[in-house]
Amino acid sequence: MIKRIGILTSGGDAPGMNAAIRAVVRSALSYGLEPYGIYNGYRGLIQNEIVPMDRSSVSDIVNRGGTILKTARLPEFCEKEIQFKAVEILQRQGIEALVVIGGDGTYRGAKALSELGINCVALPGTIDNDIGSTDYTIGFDTALNTIIDAVDKIRDTTESHSRCSIVEVMGNHCGDLALYSGIAEGAEIIITPDFRMSDEELFSTLRKMREKDVNRRAIVIVSEKIYPDIHEFAKKVEKETGFNTRATTLGYIQRGGSPSTFDRVLAGRMGAYAVDQLIAGKGGICVGVRGNTLVDYEISKALAMKKKRDDSMITIVKQINK
Ligand code: F6P
């Protein structure tokens, strides 16, 4: 059986990563394994930033946002030479297997290391919910709640001034943060990579709303990376619709904060599950949740999976954007 396992977080941080780290460390200790924390993701790995962890290393972190192991992006990790270096460092430390937490870039690193003989299990940690092999990623629920809290406030001032507020949310190329928050806010319009609307359609929908009632407000939730400059776009909306319009980019506030109960529980379950898979000798896999059941897939298959979306979501957005 394996003796020493490493754990790292990589890519954009997400609330709940600490809860996952805690679960991996505590679960490993309960089986008599020696857990090692690797700081700063794959970059820290190749720089040998590795420290042993014990029970107290993960005390009082289940409720903390961010990641105590820090994180980094290392696009160069796709280079074979760098991967060999990582393997050499792990072997020197006697670390036989890894749990990595992050998004698809993190998954690709885990796949490469597994192919080189270091078994890795990847957990989905990103606010974007953009991983096809899981219904929910660790951090998505917390980010959503942060968005809702912010948009509730934006809504008050938007209503008071009878304005149109365009709120740009994160998600990289995935529209889930916009989709779920738009539904939860009862937004007038939701625009995501999957639910686009021409400028003319958007102007005409808003124009009609205002013509019916000049005292009304409108909330438009938009995924990032759709409009090059959301503030310039807001000026255009104002000119074309008559709505006094403001844009708000929520930005990094969405990545911080104490994880929600849902994220803590999901992270805890996935962390313990990952350790079980490593003990069973598995590697090159990632963990997901389908319904309320934990599942695992080969990373190569998982990376090719498209995000499944329930038809009810599609129906609702179509009704909203009509
Ligand atoms: O992947 C998480 C995420 O927050 C995306 O939503 C966003 O596009 C990106 O990271 C921002 O990355 P960075 O931290 O490099 O600015």
Image (tube, rainbow, N blue to C red):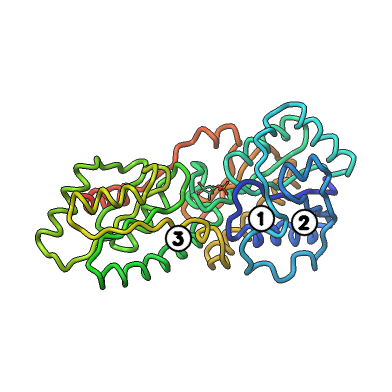
Direction from residue 303 to residue 86 in the image, left or right: right
Direction from residue 313 to residue 214 in the image, left or right: left
Residue at figure coordinates x 67%, y 58% from the top left: 67
Quadrant holding the N terminus: top right
**Disc 2 beta carbon < 8 A from ligand 1?**
no
Dot 2, crowdedness within 10 Å: few (<14), some or many (≥20)? many
Amino acid at the residue labelled 1: Gly
Above or below, 19 relative to 305: below
> Which of the pair 210/91 is nearer the observer?
210
Mark earlier in primary sequence (2, 3): 2
Q: Which mark is residue 171?
A: none
Check if mark 3's residue and mark 1's residue have beta carbons within 8 Å: no
Label 2 sits on a secondary structure element that is: helix
Which residue lies under the disc numbered 1? 271
Q: Nearer the viewer, mark 2 or mark 3?
A: 3
Direction from residue 17 to residue 166 in the image, left or right: left
Label 1 sits on a secondary structure element that is: helix
Mark earlier in primary sequence (2, 1): 2
Q: Position of residue 48 (x, y in %)?
A: 84, 44
Label 3 sits on a secondary structure element that is: helix
Mark earlier in primary sequence (3, 1): 3
Q: CA distance from mark 2 to mark 3?
A: 31 Å
Q: Position of residue 209 (x, y in %)?
A: 15, 58
Which residue lies under the disc numbered 2? 28
Quadrant of residue 167 within the rendered picture: bottom left
Amino acid at the residue labelled 2: Ala
Which residue lies under the disc numbered 3? 144
Residue sitting farthest toward the left = 212
> Which of the pair 266/84 is nearer the observer?
84
